Amino acid sequence: MIAWEKIDRVNIPGQEQEITLQKRGEEFSIRTAGVELMNSRAHGSEEELARLTCIRLTHRAALRILIGGLGMGFTLASALKHTAKDSKIIVSELIPAVILWNREYLGHLSGMPLDDPRVQVKQEDVAKTIRNKKLCWDAILLDVDNGPEGLTQKENNSLYSSSGLKAAFWALRPGGILSVWSAGENEAFTLSLRQCGFHTEKKTVRARNSQKGGMHTLWFAQKPKSALSPQSFQESLPFNKSARPAKA
Ligand SMILES: C[S@@+](CC[C@H](N)C(=O)[O-])C[C@H]1O[C@@H](n2cnc3c(N)ncnc32)[C@H](O)[C@@H]1O
């Protein structure tokens, strides 16, 4: 058996916690806190996250897609494969070293997706990217932890909280989709998505591109096409000051 070789080890920005890149023969692994975040031999469900999102949006032109985070680039490569030439894909990646690893060691695994002119990669917390823009995205794809619980950093819990899901709701265009990857089931998360106004579909898919082996869970949460804009939503609230007639 070939031993794992540590290629790089860095601290997660603002955390004590480390993230490492390791290699064993042709296989690569990204790990944090003793847990594997991504392995180059199992990427079927990461690709399905993007493919199953894109096929739900084929009726739209010039798709704008946000992916958080980059990992080994399999979700990004799949999004590129399943969207047209006029799409634009932003990838928000928290850890600068992960972007460097993709350029130096990992790019070939998924066909060098960072070289595609439709892609822009940002070193930024995806929670910030989401909150920065309203009515911007046709799809937001989240695969930053091993499910809807902060693993890479505990602050990621906010992405899956009610306020984080509402931020994603307002960042999406009407009919847009929030897609979330998870290693396992989470009924409470399905409920949270529904409570935030999403029409929610859940699918279990194979971890690898094969008929056998483990299963992962994907959520596709669609913002209703009829959803109000954030401004008209505020104005529709019964006690909103701006909705009251001005005093004479
Ligand atoms: C499981 S990997 C993603 C795997 C990826 N889907 C693929 O196809 O290879 C998780 C990635 O999310 C990044 N990440 C974690 N928290 C993040 C955050 N808050 N914002 C942006 N990226 C984050 C990690 O550094 C890591 O690169």
Image: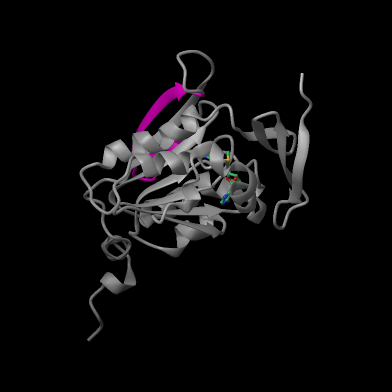
x and y percentages locating residue 72 in the rendered image: 57, 41
Is residue 98 left or right of 69 when viewed as pictured?
right
* Residue 187 drawn in magenta: no
Q: Residue at x 30, y 73 (%)?
A: 242
Q: Residue at x 76, y 23 (%)?
A: 2
Q: Residue at x 41, y 56 (%)?
A: 117
Looking at the rendered image, the quarter that the C terminus falls into is bottom left
Q: Residue furthest top?
A: 212
x and y percentages locating residue 82 in the rendered image: 33, 40
Tell me how many marks there are.
Answer: 0
Q: Is residue 228 visible?
A: yes
- Specify the segment rendered in magenta: 189-207
Near-viewer residue (55 or 7):
7
x and y percentages locating residue 42 in the rendered image: 56, 27
Is residue 128 left or right of 221 when viewed as pictured?
right
Is residue 120 left or right of 149 when viewed as pictured?
left
x and y percentages locating residue 88 in the rendered image: 36, 55
Coloring applied to the structure: one colour
The answer to which quarter of the image holds residue 221 is: top left
In the rendered image, the vertical position of residue 124 relative to residue 243, given as above or below: above
In the rendered image, the vertical position of residue 70 relative to residue 55, given as above or below: below
Q: Is residue 195 visible?
A: no
Q: Residue furthest bottom?
A: 248
In the rendered image, the vertical position of residue 25 relative to residue 195, given as above or below: above
Tell which quarter ligand 1 is in. top right
Near-viewer residue (151 or 118):
118
Near-viewer residue (159 or 95):
95
Looking at the rendered image, the quarter that the N terminus falls into is top right
Q: Residue at x 30, y 65 (%)?
A: 231
